[in-house]
Image: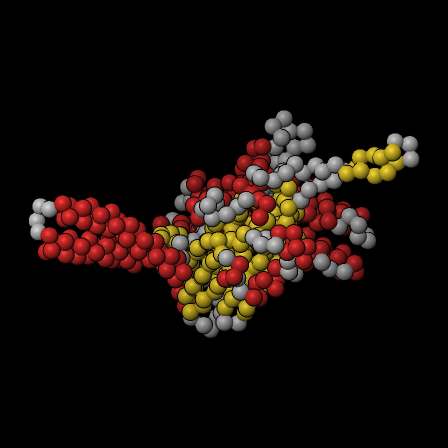
Amino acid sequence: MIDEQIKQHDKLSAEIKVNFGARKKVRVNDFIFNIWLFIPNSLDINRFNYSKQDFYRDMKSNIRLTTPVFILRDIAESENSPFTHLRRSFTNISSQPSRTNTGEYEYQIKMFLSIMKSSLRDEVGHILESSEEDIQYLVKNFTNNTKKIFHRYRELYKIINVPTIDKLHMDYYRYGEEFLCNIVEKHSYMLIRNLKKRENFGQIKSTLLDLIKEIDIYKKQRGYICVEGNSPEKNSSFVYRSGLLKKFAESDLFLNIQKRRDGVWIEQILFSLAAGISMIFATVVAFSVQQRFGNFTMPLFIALVVSYMLKDRIKELIRYYFAHRMGVRYFDHKIRMNVSETTIGWAKESVDFIKESKIPADVLRSRERPEIVEAAYKRDVEKVLLYKMHVHIDRERLNTISPYFFSGVSAILRLNFSRFLQNMDNPDFPLYLPHEEEGCIMTEGKKYYYLSLIIQKQNELQNEQKHYKVILNKEGIVRIVNAG
């Protein structure tokens, strides 16, 4: 199955996270994921001023393993939680700090942190969507389970506090501890911010603040950077270190990517064929004129010059034809997805402007273009940019890379819209209302532009579209809404 989440990453960028879930009992899993971007004609974005290279400069993409799913309660209490693998790796490196054991030790710490981050996010999301009568005990369970997890992680320190563990690998443990403190604080504050209007907020707030204070005291004891209320540097050191800790925790989920152009050998063969056809034309012309008029004659001279001129044009026309045909069949890039030395699959991607006559009917129905737009523009209502991704996952190989179960891979696509803002009008639009004394008064108006984004998902069990609208003005993204 394919699931997507789209959100505003910053003022200029939208982030689309796509999960490609490989079926357990099917070895070969293929997925088609298309993004149809309908761009208002007034923005003047087209194939002549916005090339493939421009798009790929604006599109930042990462492919990573989907984080294994554990609920917070199971991490805290279950014997099959990540602590089983974590404790084993700590014991092994303490007894024998070999390269294999140190690699496994680092891997297990990072996996534990990634799983915790995902579990906390899911737990908070579940609490925020729950009914009033459930929230209080869910928050209590959240704090209790989090405290148990902290206690279990700190107990692991006793295993590695031995002479065989060097400073580097002790630091890995400390990085994990600091990251754990930060993400628990972050999600606790998220609950406080979003539960203010709920019943019994006072008791909920007290429970969460007790957890936050306990963590904050421990962080200061361990010498970790804490957030300050009146920081002279605006807590820049904390923000910078938090980013580094996040990269450390998630680094083993990101795949080793090998990207190259798709169909390179076929392209070279076809271009060589184009050169051969043009050379055949020039040679036939030269031989024919030479046979009729002889050597070293003016007609032969003229024929050689003309045939040479036409030969280059014929070659370029045939190259253009082959390139167009290849663009239909082949993608721009092919990405090999590796974990260590194991190839678990590949992904292909391409982008191009599409004529409206080539857009599938179901995509146009999902677009639901307002009639007034059709009436205003008559033709060339929008330019349509199609980004295609084809993902292939080998389930058997994916199962061999780790003791954890990975449901599939996730693609994180971040599209920067700064180029789309260049031809926008000023966002402030003056409007007027009648006034008894002044005659009229000015009121505020805002001019927005609407980009429709149709997500198309296809595999053997799924064929559906989702419609999102990206609302922008000259200052950047205003909001992103789900339009159905």
Residue 90: give x, y in percent of width and height: 46, 52
Horizontally, residue 178 falls left or right of residue 212, namely left
Horizontally, residue 330 falls left or right of residue 434, namely left
Residue 197: give x, y in percent of width and height: 80, 50
Q: Toward the viewer: 212 or 16?
A: 16
Q: Toward the viewer: 39 or 138?
A: 39
Q: Quadrant of residue 465?
A: bottom right
Q: Quadrant of residue 73?
A: bottom right
Res. 453 visible in picture: yes
Res. 68 visible in picture: no
Q: Quadrant of residue 9?
A: top right
Residue 466: give x, y in percent of width and height: 60, 61
Residue found at the far bottom of this picture: 25
- Give the colour scheme shown: secondary structure
Residue 307: give x, y in percent of width and height: 21, 50
- Residue found at x 64% / y 46%: 449
Residue found at the far right of this picture: 436
Q: Toward the viewer: 72 or 314?
A: 314
Horizontally, residue 35 falls left or right of residue 281, namely right
- Total labels drawn: 0
- Residue found at x 57% / y 63%: 363
- Residue found at x 80% / y 35%: 442
Residue found at the far left of this picture: 295
- Residue found at x 38% / y 57%: 324
Query: Which quadrant holds the C terminus?
Result: bottom right
Looking at the image, residue 10 lies above or below residue 256: above
